[in-house]
Amino acid sequence: MKRRSLLRALAALPILAFPRRLFAAAPGYPRLLQGPMIGATTPGSFTVWSRASGSFGVAVEYATDRAFSDAKTTAAVPAGAEEDHVTRIEVTGLKPDTAYYYRIKADGIDDRNQPLPFRTRTAPDKPRPIRIAFGSCARVQLDAVQPVFDAITAAEPDLFLWLGDNIYADSDQPVAFTELYGRQRNVASIQPLFRSVPQLALWDDHDFGHNDSDGTNPVKPMTLAMFKRWWANPSAGTPDTPGIFCRHSFGPVDVFMLDGRYYRDPPKAPNGPNKTMLGAAQKAWLKRELKASRATFKVLASGTGWSRAESGGDSWAMYLDERNELLDFIRDNRIAGCIGISGDVHMGEANCVPWSDRGGYDFYDLVSSGLAQMLSPKFIDQDPEVRLRAPWVGSHNFGVLDFTFGADPKVEMSVRNVMGGSVWDPITIRAADLVNGRQSWKAAIDRKELARRTRVERGGAYYGPEE
């Protein structure tokens, strides 16, 4: 009996040696259900999004030292039931372009399910090479593994942009959005990217409402509230104009995340100068912000493609009067450095709107879709103004913008496959090309695509037997 008692006492010693914060095993142990995820960053701050397991305070402990010898902790933010226990905590007073270790304090203790600290980086305050990755169309119902995110993380982007259809809710019920956002956030392959790289997002039809939904969506205030709950953008709309649009500066790059759904007229509405995707107030905001921007490059991010390729869908091809108005505005106000990115179409593309023909400069549209969705070769029936590269439907994919600065700033644009390799020769555009009067698309186009374009101009088919 004495021996049995001694063995029981010895077995208990390792447990007793741990402090409460490391071994608490009660069912109500405070922890995160989703997250952490890094949201918007600035040179002096980063934002941490998370969703907690109950109503308690959530704080962020952070340090420049892996051992947390210089650790500080933010004030606790209540994770209340009214916001489904979501918190967004901004860590401020930091040094620019500096790596920080951080971990979550849930109700004052460490999350035992995430015992190791994570690392992220504040935004730069001086020009340096910047890599922005992006993608769209992540359908967790179709692909619960999503290996493309392993490749995205390995590419080491400084910023990742979600360009819509981030979930496929296709519903007017809050429970569907909560369930699918939660499932997508828990995909294992995404966790390293979420925890280290700043994430910004816009929406498209499937995370705004139903397929091809527009501004007539009767539950759009609910879907807007869901979007704002589950993302950590720097802002959403303006005080007098609801929506998800925002502008975010990252070094010498300004990113304009556009809301192409909240104010969108139905795609099949008659074409004309009053037909809108953005709505009057958002369009006025965009024009003001573009004029105010001093960034070398300005990235206009849209959920749907900028070219006329998808003429029967719900892209900018169905709103060409408004798109052309924006390109004319950029030209007339001598706003240099604008490029476009988009998603939605379930393939990778590189297209161009040759506005140099109208006294402006060529507007490029790099397209990436989908991250985890069925791919579609519908490009066979499409006719963008200029197709620079053969569309990619070989695998799930993501887009990459590599910016370099100095005497001759450039951006290299590529679409990467599920392994992280570029699917075709990248397109390099100089900032000096993105000014009025400069034509650059003829130097950027693939020779095979140029031959196909020439054949069409002579009355032949884009894809023909000569190939």
Image (cartoon, rainbow, N blue to C red):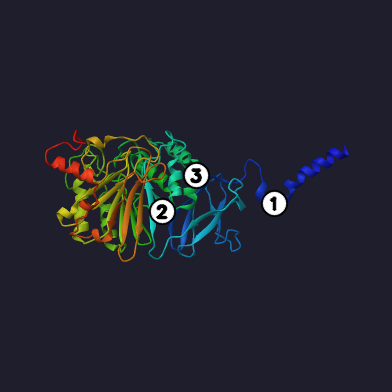
Kind of residue sitting beneath label 2: Leu
Q: Residue at x 62, y 44 (%)?
A: 29
Q: Which mark is residue 239?
A: none
Q: CA distance from mark 3 to mark 2?
A: 27 Å
Q: Nearer the viewer, mark 3 or mark 2?
A: 2
The C terminus: image quadrant: top left
Task: Determine the residue located farthest toward the front in the rendered image.
Answer: 466
Amino acid beneath label 3: Asp
The residue at which mark 2 appears reads as: 159
Mark count: 3
Question: Do we see residue 99 in this rendering?
Answer: yes
Given residues 170 and 69, the one toward you in this image is: 69
Name the residue beneath numbered marker 1: 19
- Rendered residue at 45%/48% (across/down): 153
Considering the image in quadrants, where does the N terminus appear? top right
Disc 3 target residue? 84
- The Cα–Cα distance between marks 1 and 2, rounded to whole angstroms, is 37 Å
Q: Residue 93, position in %: x, y?
A: 49, 65
- Dot 3, how many residues are within 10 Å of its Cα: few (below 14), some (14-19), or many (20+)? some
Neighbour tally class for label 1: few under 14, some 14-19, many 20 plus, Cα within 10 Å = few
Residue drawn 23% across the image and 48% down it: 445
37 or 177, which is in the foreground? 37
Q: Tag 2 or tag 1, which sits nearer the N-term?
A: 1
What amino acid is labelled 1 in the image? Pro
Task: Name the N-terminal-most of marks 3 and 1.
Answer: 1
Given this view, does label 3 or label 1 mark the residue nearer the observer? 1
Rounded to the nearest angstrom, the CA distance separating label 3 from label 1 is 30 Å
Q: Position of residue 40 (x, y in %)?
A: 43, 55
177 to the left or right of 327:
right
Above or below for 71 versus 174:
below
Secondary structure under tag 1 reads loop
Residue ranking furthest to the left: 458
